[in-house]
Image (cartoon, rainbow, N blue to C red):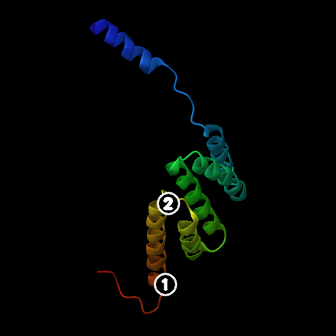
């Protein structure tokens, strides 16, 4: 009995796992990121986001959405633009993605305030 169980475990471990549904798309994103093409990376995230939300893969869809918004913010506007886009996305995204988007929005807002507090002439030193 133990040998059959060990054989079953060995077969289960050795069996190749199927690739994720959007593995090829994520590899394209990585390749575009490695070649430093932010516009291409942004355009590759949108189809992943839509397909993941359609498949109810909430984590993957939220990841694609958040990465796209972060890249768009880095290109044009910085933290303030990213916070605005996250605010808009958190109202239109599926309900399952909203808590994480709100968390990311809060983190970006904190980052924005910390950066600008240091630049302000009337900044109060941190405690």
Q: Name the residue: 55% across, 59% down.
A: 66
Distance Cα–Cα, label 1 vs label 2? 37 Å
Q: Name the residue: 52% across, 22% down.
A: 16
Q: Which of marks 1 and 2 is in front?
A: 2
| Residue 30 drawn at (x, y percent) | 62, 46
- Apparent side of residue 5 relative to residue 30 in the rendered image (left or right): left
- Apparent side of residue 10 relative to residue 76 in the rendered image (left or right): left
Nearest the viewer among 89 and 70 is 89
Q: Name the residue: 60% across, 74% down.
A: 81
**Quarter of the rendering occupied by the C terminus:** bottom left
**Other residues around mark 2 within 10 Å, as few (<14) / some (14–19) / many (≥20):** few
- Apparent side of residue 79 relative to residue 46 in the rendered image (left or right): left
Of the numbered discs 1 and 2, the one sitting upstream in the chain is 2
Label 2 belongs to which residue?
95
| Mark identifier at residue 90 | none
Nearest the viewer among 117 and 14 is 14
| Residue 5 drawn at (x, y percent) | 32, 12
Residue 21 occupies quadrant: top right
Establish if 81 lies above or below 119.
Answer: above
């Amino acid at each position: 009995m133990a040998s059959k169980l060990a054989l079953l475990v060995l077969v289960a471990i050795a069996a190749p796992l199927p690739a994720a549904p959007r593995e090829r798309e994520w590899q394209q994103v990585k390749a575009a990121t490695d070649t430093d093409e932010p516009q291409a990376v942004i355009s590759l995230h949108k189809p992943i986001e839509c397909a993941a939300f359609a498949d109810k893969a909430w984590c993957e869809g939220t990841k694609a959405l958040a990465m796209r918004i972060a890249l768009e913010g880095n290109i044009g506007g910085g933290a303030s633009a990213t916070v605005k886009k996250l605010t808009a996305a958190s109202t239109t995204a599926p309900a399952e993605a909203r808590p994480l988007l709100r968390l990311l929005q809060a983190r970006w807002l904190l980052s924005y305030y910390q950066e600008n507090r240091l630049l302000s002439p009337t900044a109060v030193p941190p405690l």
